[in-house]
Each structure stands twice: as structure tokens, then as C-alpha cells.
Amino acid sequence: MSTLDFGSLRVDVIPCGEFRLDGGAMFGQVPRPRWETFARPDDRHRIVMGTNALLVRGAQFVLLIESGCGARWTADERAFFGIQDPDALVRGLAACGVRPEDVTHVTASHLHFDHSGGLFTGEAPDAPTAESDVRFANAVHLLQGIEWRAAMRPPELQKASYRGPFERIAARGRLREVRGDEAVLPGVKLRFTGGHTDGHQVIELDGGTDRGVFFGDLLPTAWHLPPAYTMAYDLHPQQVITKKREMLEECAARAAACFFYHDPDPRPARVRRDGKRYVAERFGGDAADAFGG
Ligand SMILES: [Zn+2]
């Protein structure tokens, strides 16, 4: 687990367990002979993905960004998606001295199952049939209104991606809809991007001494640094390309820490421009860890 001191913010990466998705779908129009050189598929054509949530603590708040796939899966589904260690979120928080009831705010780049599953209770193996409720009962859920409505009524292309008792968040009075860009907490700004979903956002952190950007699925792994490396899951790939380039330029100019939620390597990286390419250098890494597309 990496801990970063951003000045007024303390940031911990909390890996919530690996899962697997189809390699071809993860790389959209990129041909397999290209992506399989760095992302080796298994015998079912799947590649290993991380779910690297962020715990951000300020003087007055405890914010969780993303929550992994959660535990509400049947044995068959767990095998299909290769979901590992569904209890890693709660364990990771505990390792930071945080109980679910201590979390004051949660947010998510968007509400697909691999980003929002951990927001709900229900532990394996009974989870799929157990009564489920919000896990972070004291937390304000800061969600883009557009994304919230998509979760309630998913677009046809992404029907399988939204699953969870989202209505419980509103029923508990824990939903706060955000519209567009908003500074929601000291040093924390939500920034609307669209692209991957209609309501996708990234999260910007600024603790005074250091900055960071949590990319969500705008840039899921360092492998996706080339702007044109989009996913088959993206609702609007061209918007992903435009926004990704814009955010990468800003990150390079400000030397911001970049957090890649689905990267099998949970360490954040700094991004710099090398000619036309973007190169990521891992925190705590050496030159061999640089990866550019
Ligand atoms: Zn995702």
C-alpha cells in the first residue's frame, strides 16, 4: 500500500482485489498482437486488472474514492470475472485505522460494478441473496447526477455494467448529486469528463504541497496512456481521447501524481511528455518502471 503526503491531505492507495476482463474489450480497436506484448491474456483471453481505491484524509473528512467489485457475487460470477479477495476493501481501510462508520464521504468516477460494488454490504458466500444496504452509512455519497440516473436506468450498451441496490443510497438520505465541476471538500475537486459513461468524472486532489489526479476509467491503466487507446466499454470513445489528452497535459505541466484504478501495479506515477508520447514514472520505482505508449 502506498501512502502519500500531499500537505493538508493524506492519501492511501487501497487495492481492493484483482479481477479479470476480456483483453480485447479493454483495448478497443488496438490489435491483440500489440497489447498482448505488455498485458498477457490468460487461456480465457482475460487480463488481470487491479481495483485501486483511494482513501483521502483531510483535517475534517475521511473520503473514499471507488470501492472495488464488492462481494455480492455468485460463485459462477466470481469465477467468470476472476474476482479475488472481495473483503480487501474493509481490510485495507482497517489497516489505515478506518472503520466503515468513520468514512464521512464517498465518491466514484462512475457507478459500474467494478467501481461501486463495495459501497454495499453483503459478504461472500451468501452475498448474492443476502439483504444489502449501504456499507458507509454515515457517508455523504457525492455522485454526478447524470451518473446516478444512468445507474437507475442504464443505457442499453452498458446494462450489464450497473448492478447494485443504488436506490438504497437515496433512501438512506445519503445521496448528494453533483452537477459538473465542483470543489466538494478542502483540496478535493470533482471534474466532469463524460466519455466512458455520460456521467464520468475524475477527482483532483490538491493538498497545497502536492497534487494528484484520480483518473477512474478515463485512463484505467498506464497501458492506456496513448490517448487513442480506448476501451470497447467506452460509451463515447472520441470524448475519452479528447479529455484524456487534456488531463494528461495538465498532469505533466503540474507534476501531479496520477492514480490508475485498474492498473495491476497500484503505485501512482508522474506523467511526462517525451516527444509525442506520454511516459509514466512510478513513485518509488526506477527508470525501468517507466512506461510509455
Ligand atoms: Zn472500470
Image: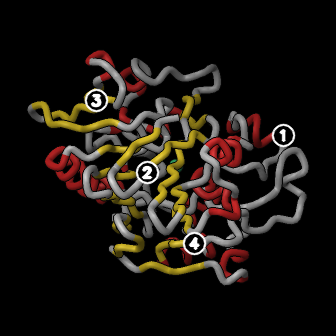
Which residue type carries mark 4? His
Which residue type carries mark 1? Ala
Q: Residue at x 87, y 65 (%)?
A: 131
Q: In this rendering, is residue 120 above or below 248?
A: below
| Pointer 4 residue | 141
Dot 1 or dot 4, earlier in sequence? 1
Which residue type carries mark 3? Glu
Which residue type carries mark 2? Arg
Point out which mark residue 281 bears. Answer: 3
Q: Residue 145: x, y in percent?
A: 49, 78
Report the side of 21 relative to 261 (left or right): right
Are dots 1 and 4 in contact, CB under 8 Å?
no
* Kind of element beneath mark 4: strand
Q: Residue at x 13, y 31 (%)?
A: 274
* Kind of element beneath mark 2: strand
Label 3 or label 2, whichever lies nearer to me, is 2
Label 1 or label 4, whichever lies nearer to me, is 4
**How far apart are labels 1 and 4 at the CA level?**
29 Å
Residue 152, located in which quarter of the rendered image?
bottom right
Dot 1 or dot 2, earlier in sequence? 2
The C terminus lies in quadrant: top left
**How far apart are labels 1 and 2 at the CA level?**
36 Å
Residue nearer the viewer, 101 or 17: 101
Dot 3 or dot 2, earlier in sequence? 2
| Pointer 2 residue | 10
